[in-house]
Image (cartoon, grey):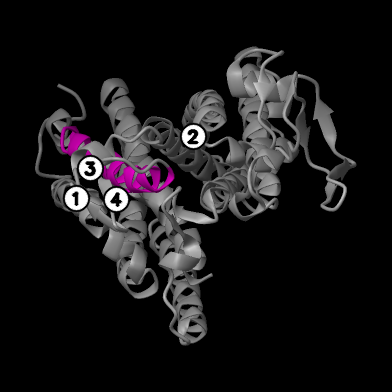
Amino acid sequence: MLTLLTLSVHILYATVGVGIPLMIIIAQWIGIKKNDNHYILMARRWARGFVITVAVGVVTGTIIGLQLSLLWPNFMELAGNIIALPLFMEVFAFFFEAIFLGIYLYTWDRFENQKKHFLLLIPVALGAGMSAYFITVVNGFMNAPQGFDIVDGTLVNANPVLAMFNLAAPTKVAHVLATAYMTSAFILATIAAFCLIRGSKQAYHKKALHMTMKIGLIFSIAAALIGDFSGKYLAEYQPEKLAAAEWHFETERGAPLVMYGVLDEETQEVKYGIKIPYALSILAFGSPNAEVIGLNEFPVEEQPPLEVHYYFDIMVTIGSFMIVVALLYWFGMRQGYSFVTSKWFRWIIVLGGPLSMLAIEAGWWLAEFGRQPWILRGIMTVDQAATSSDYVGHMFVLFAILYAILMIGTLVILRKIFANNPVEKELAKLDAEKGGGQTWKS
């Protein structure tokens, strides 16, 4: 439970840490191309807030590294020499990102041509993406271990590079990146929509909302497409995980996709669920008549917990909802429909950020619980890997208090930063810089 708590907190900061740099890049590039101070200010303000989330993300990420040794000593003894390389490379990627982020933040007024300043953002975004890649391939390795031999219960002939290019990595990395960009866009859209609801007439917020909703639409569709590839990967290489997520118990052709419902575990009957004919066969193999392996084909002790079905439902429902909302916004803006600027629709957009973060959590829980009982699939179970210490419960309470302080502190600091620097004040400052000779394009 302690590791679940830590990962659940860290994934929020990690998602923002991966996604926000791309939003900053797009905003500053548009500002330079259009010579528009509103977009330049978006980049400045988002970068300022981004630093706070990065700082807290470092703390939670460091705690994960500590807990790997404290809570999972047997796993680290077995697989430590494999995952050490990607974990080290993740740290390197973070420092690479942090160095250029620092230079970017402290050189706003040092470049006459802002295109040169903009170039500093590229390594920031690359570093964030590399961090996501290296940490995700570790998770992929746990789902599809390779690059070693097992002799007498000992891992030998370790090849960390081969292990990083495991079969699970491509879909996992792609899905992590797409959902990070999607979630970050919808979080920023939430802020812009809320400011407009509160009565702001600033074009800054309208432009921020329009830009982030379009980006959110692109990456929400991308996440859905990559999710389809993930389903096909599971059908081929982790069929028990797919079967548990879909409450699919008997092997059959033309298998339906079950959404929602309540399960009677004794009879394996799903009540109140929505069955979509042939959809599971299509998701798994791209054919409506394909045979999908049922969960009953696997030993009971190797079956994932059936609660993962609910995580799948949450993730898919929210993802689909956000695609619809973003499509309605895009189409409504193009056609000039008034409902897009109405207060009730903007409240729906405000919900998009928190819902997207909930979808991130549900997707992560699906990934982690769906792998159980294995920590290293087919080799070591969670029970075999975990510490036998009696003090884990005490640590859970202490870390829960720490995370509550960090998350509340993050919100308080971010609110204070932006409350003390309103958009109007910063726009006036940018206009003054421009009048003094600062240029945003060559």
Please report contact status of discs 4 and 2: CB closer than 8 Å, yes or no: no
Q: Nearer the viewer, mark 4 or mark 1?
A: 4
Residue 360 in the image: state x and y as whole percent: 54, 46
Mark 2 or mark 3, which is nearer the start of the sequence? 3
Q: Is residue 48 visible?
A: yes
Residue 331, horizontal then vertical, whole percent: 64, 17
First in sequence: mark 4 vs mark 3: 3
Question: Mark 2 — residue?
Answer: 203
What secondary structure is found at the residue carrying circle 2? Answer: helix
| Mark 4 vs mark 3, CA separation in Å | 34 Å
Disc 1/disc 2 C-alpha distance (Å): 47 Å
The magenta stretch spans which residues? 118-143
Q: Position of residue 183 (x, y in %)?
A: 50, 41
Of 203 and 216, nearer the camera is 216
Q: Check residue 127 in the rendering and tell me which mark sits there, or answer none.
A: 3
Residue depth check, mark 3 versus mark 1: number of the one nearer the observer? 1
Mark closer to the chain start, 3 or 1:
1
Which quadrant does the N terminus fall into? bottom right
Q: Residue at x 45, y 48 (%)?
A: 378
